[in-house]
Image: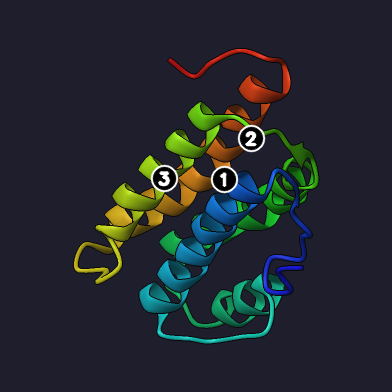
Amino acid sequence: MDEWWGVTLTGDEKAVKSLSELIDVNKTLFENLYKVKTDTIEELVNILDNQVPEHEKQFLNYVREQLPNLRRYLQFKLPSNPQLISSVEYEIYITGAEMDCEYPDDARGRIISFFNHTPELIDLYKEGFSAE
C-alpha cells in the first residue's frame, strides 16, 4: 500500500515494482518542488492551497480533481507485460530529470504528465494493445 497516494498496487510483481517506483518519484518531485513533506497527497495540496501564488492554484485544483481518476486506474491488477514496464521505466527516467526542480514549470508539467499518461498506459495494456 502506498499510503501517500492512497493506493494499493496489485498484479505482476515487476509491473507493480516499476509503477511503485514511478509513483514514488512523483511524490518526491512534489515534495522537492514545494519543499513540504506530508503524510498524504491531499494533506500536501491542502497545505499548499494557502501558500502558493494564485496562478499555481490551478495546478493544485487539477491535482485535486484528477486524483480520484488516477487512483481508480492504479487499482487495476497490473499485467505481466514487458512493454508496460518499459513505458513506466521511461516515465521514471524523464521524471527523474526534473528532481532538482530547477525549472518549476517543467516539474509541474511532469506531475501533470503522470496524472494524464499513467491512466492512458494502463488502459492500453488493460485492453491488450501495445504502447508503440
User: Compared with residue 42, is residue 85 higher up or lower down, i.e. above or below?
Assistant: above
Residue 70 rendering spot, x and y as whole percentages: 69, 46
Q: How far apart are marks 2 and 1 (CA)?
A: 7 Å
Type of residue at label 2?
A: Pro
Q: Tell me the SS state at disc 3.
A: helix
Type of residue at label 1?
A: Phe
Q: Residue 89 carries which label?
A: 3
**Label 2 neighbour load within 10 Å: few <14, some 14-19, many 20+:** some
Type of residue at label 3?
A: Glu
Horizontal relation, residue 90 to residue 128: left or right: left
Looking at the picture, tell me which residue is in the foreground, 71 or 2.
2
Residue at position x 65%, y 32% from top? 122
User: Compared with residue 87, is residue 51 higher up or lower down, i.e. above or below?
Assistant: below
Quadrant of the snapshot with the C terminus: top left
Q: Mark 2 points at which residue?
A: 119
Residue 12 rendering spot, x and y as whole percentages: 70, 43
Q: Tell me the SS state at disc 2.
A: helix
Q: Which of marks 3 and 2 is in front?
A: 3
Residue at position x 77%, y 60% from top? 7
Q: Name the residue under label 1.
A: 115
> Do the residues bearing badges 3 and 2 touch, measured as CB atoms within 8 Å?
no
Looking at the picture, tell me which residue is in the foreground, 10 or 45.
10
